[in-house]
Amino acid sequence: MSPLHRKILGFLLAPLGTALAAAIWFAVGLLFVPKLIPVMSAEDPLGFVWVLGVLTLVAAGLLLLVGVPAAIVFARRGITGLGPHVLVGCLAGLVPAAALAFAGASLAGPHLARIVSQYSSTGLGLGGATTLVYWQIARPDVA
């Protein structure tokens, strides 16, 4: 498979990494720290599916807005390592998660700090997971 085909396949499959990482995070949160996941509960099992769908769509959008230009810049500059790619992915996940947390702060009241830290760290991890899936498929270091 050519390097270009691997990159295209990586961009198509990377949002699924977000969904998989979110599913693992939610499952672990529900098993060990039920209060960690305020979005869903046992009474609302469809909330889980809805959240995974939204996270996958957000990941796909961010991949187009941030990932593709970053990949082009990295390719032109010869940056092929995993570290810079994951750093950009983590930051791309952190910024909108923090923005969404601050936007929802009016609903949160005094719990703003907890919500910002929870969703910002989640966005950071999910952005990194998405980038890791892309990098493992595209393998810019062996192109």
Image (tube, rainbow, N blue to C red):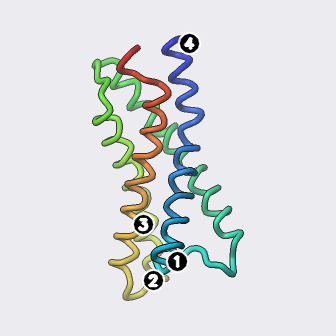
In the rendered structure, are the residues bearing label 4 and label 2 in contact, judged by CB atoms less than 8 Å apart? no
Q: Tell me the distance, in whole angstroms, between the alpha carbons under discs 1 and 3.
A: 11 Å
Amino acid type, label 2: Ala
Amino acid type, label 4: Met
Amino acid type, label 1: Pro
Q: Earlier in the sequence, mark 3 or mark 4?
A: 4
User: In this picture, is 102 found above or below 88?
Assistant: below
* Residue found at x 28% / y 19%: 77
* Residue found at x 45% / y 30%: 136
For disc 1, the marked residue is 38
Q: Residues within 10 Å of mark 4 (few under 14, many from 20)?
A: few
Nearest to the eye among marks 1 and 2: give it.
Answer: 1
Q: Tell me the distance, in whole angstroms, between the alpha carbons under discs 1 and 2.
A: 12 Å
Q: Tell me the distance, in whole angstroms, between the alpha carbons under discs 2 and 3.
A: 13 Å
Amino acid type, label 3: Tyr
* Residue found at x 40% / y 28%: 71
